[in-house]
Amino acid sequence: SRPRVWVSQPLFDDVIGRLDEYFDVQSTAQVSEYAAGEIAAHLRQAHGAVVTLNERIGTAEIAGAAHLRAIANVGVGYNNLDIPALSAAGIIATNTPDVLTETTADFGFALLMATARRITEAERWLRAGQWQQWSFSSMLGSDLHGSTLGILGMGRIGQGIARRGAGFGMRVLYHNRSRLPAAVEGQCQASYVDLDSLLRQSDHLLLVLPYSPEVHHLIDASALSKMKPSATLVNIARGGIVDEVALAAALAQGRLAGAGLDVYEGEPQVRPELLALDNVVLTPHIASASLATRRAMVTLAVDNLIAALGEGPQAGRPATPINADVITGKTIATKR
Ligand code: GLV
Ligand code: GLV
């Protein structure tokens, strides 16, 4: 019988349908929230799976999955996957970088502009019939042109944001675990600084770094206290990077002018402290959500899974593996 594949969420039916050529596919017509035991039950039957960032997959979920050989994550961030556990079990994991870079950088800029220029707050004010209360000093925001843009996390998306910042006439600073080659810095017109300087000098700070436990609450009360009270903070990375309680307090007390958040610690829950504030723009994790890019992400995930399970033109060579060492056999597979 053919290998079995589990698809955790409704994606694009026509793209997912390409899996039917090779596999018996179990998919769902409904957006689903799974308990850990339910994921384990699905994986127990499966040779491969297409999952989203809402599905956490670690030791417990793969414990009984004797046939499982590949997990294709639809997303560039993969903190939902326990990669060491998957590698130890000989399971190839893939993600969807590159195809979402420009779309996500566009959105980071959109969220920055909405926050700095108070676009959503102004619209709420208009819709509430308050334009009659207009004065010359209503809805004053801060400029992007001529200001200092700080980027924390200078991967592909960070570099895309840097290029946009330079195009908007901003001075661009960045901090990253490792400094970029001078040629790349030159292309992005971005200068490397330490984290402390980035916090202190940025008029607008964008978070674009991957989440790992080492950066949990990297932006805490102490980090926020180093930022200018006139500054804007935008997070399109992962919620866990920011201490949201400290952020809400800083915003409420005027120690930070505004924030734009696309990601949260407890998605899909948003803290009431944040919902109560006017100077924060809140979006529901949509940075990669253009039609073309979401389709491209699912297409790449499907191609990755077909290849990782040894089928199709790229058999054995998925384009964007996370743990390539599993493919080359460098990982010592333990009890399967
Ligand atoms: C979305 O957050 C992604 O990582 O692609
Ligand atoms: C993620 O690593 C990215 O910036 O593309």
Image (cartoon, grey):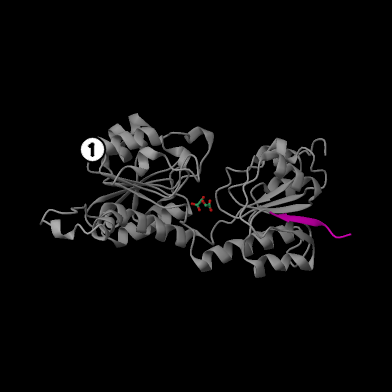
Label 1 environment density (alpha carbons within 10 Å; few <14, some 14–19, many ≥20): few
Viewport quadrant of the N terminus: bottom right
- In which quadrant of the rendered image does the C terminus lie? top right
How many numbered marks, from 0 up? 1
Q: Is residue 316 above or below residue 251?
A: below
Q: Could you say where residue 4 lies in the image, as x and y percent from the top left?
A: 80, 56
User: Which residue is located at x 73 percent, y 60 percent?
Assistant: 307
Q: Is residue 329 visible?
A: no
Q: Residue furthest front?
A: 129
Quadrant assignment, res 295: bottom right
Relative image position of residue 57 (x, y in whole percent):
66, 42
Q: Which residue is mark 1?
A: 254
What residue is shown at x 55% (from left), y 48% (from top)? Answer: 77
Q: In this rendering, would 125 be left or right of 56?
A: left
Residue at the top extreme, as displayed: 222
Across and down, in percent, residue 39 comes to: 70, 44
Say which element carries label 1. loop
User: Is any atom of residue 127 visible in this view?
Assistant: yes
Which span of residues is magenta-colored? Answer: 1-7
- Identify residue type, mark 1: Gly
Q: Using the image as rendered, state which of residue 19 and residue 192 is in the foreground.
A: 19
Residue 244 part of the magenta segment:
no
Camera-nearest residue between 168 and 222: 222
